[in-house]
Image (tube, coloured by chain):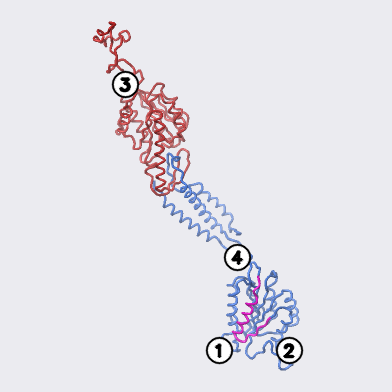
Amino acid sequence: MNLAVEQPWLLAGLLFCALPLLRYGQRVAGHPALDLIPADGLSLAVDAAIRLLGALALAGLVLGMAGIYRTEQQVERIGHGAHIVLLLDRSNSMDQTFAGTAAETGGAESKAAAARRLLSQFVERREHDLIGVAAYSTSPLFVTPLTENKQAVAAAIAATARPALAYTNVSKGLALALSYFDQRPAVGARIVLLVSDGAAVIDPDSEAKLRELFQRQQVRLYWVFLRTANSPGLFDQPSDPRDDNAQAMPERYLHLFFSSLHIPYQAYQAEDPGAMRQAIEDINRLEQQPLHYFERIPKQDLAPLCYRSAALLLLLLIAVKACEAKC
Amino acid sequence: MASRIEPFCYRLPRPAVEVYPGAHPGQMVGNGQLFKRHEALLARPDPRRLDLRASLLDPFGQYRVKAYQEHDRVEVMVLADLSASLAYSGVFDKRQVMLDLIRAIAESALACGDRIGFAGFGAGEKPLLYAPPGGDLSWLSSLNGVLEQLPQQRGCHGLWQADAYLPRRRALLFLLGDGHWPTAQLPALLASVGRHELVPLLIWDAAEYRALPDWGLLALQDPESGRRRRLWLRPSLKRRIELAYSRRRCLLQRLFRAAGSEPLFIEQGYRVEQFNRYFLERAA
């Protein structure tokens, strides 16, 4: 409970809280022999309660005016889960269906929509995970950092409903995704979930850098490859040895690159939404390690609470005022 | 208001001791209407009262003279508690009741030809208003001013040493107050004024205890100590307050009866019939 106020000088008004303790706030009738009136516990309790109500109501008003708030806090939590970075492909081809046609014409859902739907369900089920979202096209797009806030993640995933961008630059996307783990405690599993429908050539400079990053960050890599019908798969051997190069078959070479990283790596080749669901459920089942993390609770304005409670207390005091005996 | 004041008739259970003639049967033997005894002419040389028949029958052949009981004057003294608690105004204004009582006593005393004095005590040791027994009532006009100042008097400490202001000889003494005194000091005062005929007049008011509302929140302040209390009135608390008051009444009655006088509780202002009945019962 770290409390702070916007205008500390207004806290001087808390001195007014002493007023109900000193004064009666009701007509005081004279009585010639107060000592004759027997001691009464209930009357004492009522008196104390009225004074307390008055003091609290004034305190509520003053604190409300001073603008009391609870500062941002970190809460230590332990859950079962992982740090997951969803790396989404935002290239044009994601807006097509698994059959390779434009989504509007066929009536079938696009690859992006299927990914969105399944990832949203996935995020909902992962209660204690810290999930970050990154996307890439020609350039990497930072969407949300690693966060516990499921609403933010769901909104980030939903935002991919916007029309897709240009081409595929997977190496910069991966570098961005890996940078999410910088300055993060190495607890729980670290997962990069790459959802894409194609690959691109990684130039040798980027390749060396990525190798080094993967080694340092100790991540697990899952690649959900949304394969368009009749496009080359991850595990296809080229029929012609002359086609066996990164330019002709980027997906195969990216898979080979990932396999050579010496990190836990799993590739899923999804040719329809059902296969993709299978891949995501696998990940969901596998990644259930204990996770120790800090949750951030944002700054919370307590002034409305103060005003509400002051109003309630004042209503009570008005009720008490109505109970005054006419003598 | 003055027309309302009707003098009451007081009589004393014991003969008066003053030497001056008045309206009350006295101890003195002298000129009067009531035959008391025969005396020798030498002892009472008043030939007008010579009783020839008694002189003839006297075996020593002496002249006998009739002696009569003389009616004497009585000194009336009013001792008043002038503390702030008497400034209370409930069903009746206690100050007005006190003024009525003092005027009634004064008029009754003057009607009998007695002399009246007054001593009212506030917070100080000295009386706020002191008038030795006498025939003039000029102090009555200054009493109003004293009663105006009543709320400033925190207690009646002088009252406990009131003996110094009382006549040396036996007098009729009215003790005027509300009875809300510390009872520890009362027996000493009663003992010090024991030679006088004490008539305690205690002014109570139904609004203090009986006429309180059944329910509600009531804030009360003691005018003397300034202490305040908030009460959550309810029938059970009201019953306890009434019980405390009736206990107090019993305690005061016991204390005053121990000193040989019955207290008179004035709850409905000055009523002449209450006083007349009180004095008839007292003399009986």
Compute the Cα span from label 1 to label 4: 45 Å
> Residue A106, which numbered label?
1
Chain B tint as drawn: red
Could you say whether the residue bearing mark 4 is in a helix, strand or loop? loop
- Identified at 33% across, 34% down, the residue is B270
Asked if marks 2 and 4 touch (Cβ < 8 Å), the reply is no
Looking at the image, tell me whether mark 1 or mark 4 is earlier in sequence order: 1
Instruction: Give the residue type at disc 4.
Output: Pro
Query: Which tag is nearer the camera, tag 1 or tag 3?
Result: 3
Viewer-side label of 4, 3:
3
Q: Is residue A319 left or right of residue A155?
A: left
Residue positioned most to the top: B61
Specify the label residue B51 is tagged with.
Answer: none
Task: Name the amino acid, label 2.
Answer: Asn
Q: CA distance from mark 1 to mark 3?
A: 136 Å
Disc 2: CA contacts within 10 A as few (<14), some (14-19) or many (>=20): few
Residues at discs 1 and 2 both on one chain: yes
Q: Residue type at mark 1: give it.
A: Gly
- Which chain does blue denote in the image? A
Q: Chain of mark 1?
A: A
| Stretch in magenta | A266-290
Q: Which residue is mark 4?
A: A298
**Do labels 1 and 2 touch, CB within 8 Å?**
no
- The kind of residue tagged 3 is Pro
The location of residue B71, given as percent across then percent down, is: 31, 19
Alpha-carbon distance for marks 2 and 3? 150 Å
Mark 2 secondary-structure assignment: loop
For mark 2, name the chain.
Answer: A
- A182 lies above or below B227: below
* Element assignment for label 3: strand
The reply to the same-chain question for discs 1 and 4 is: yes
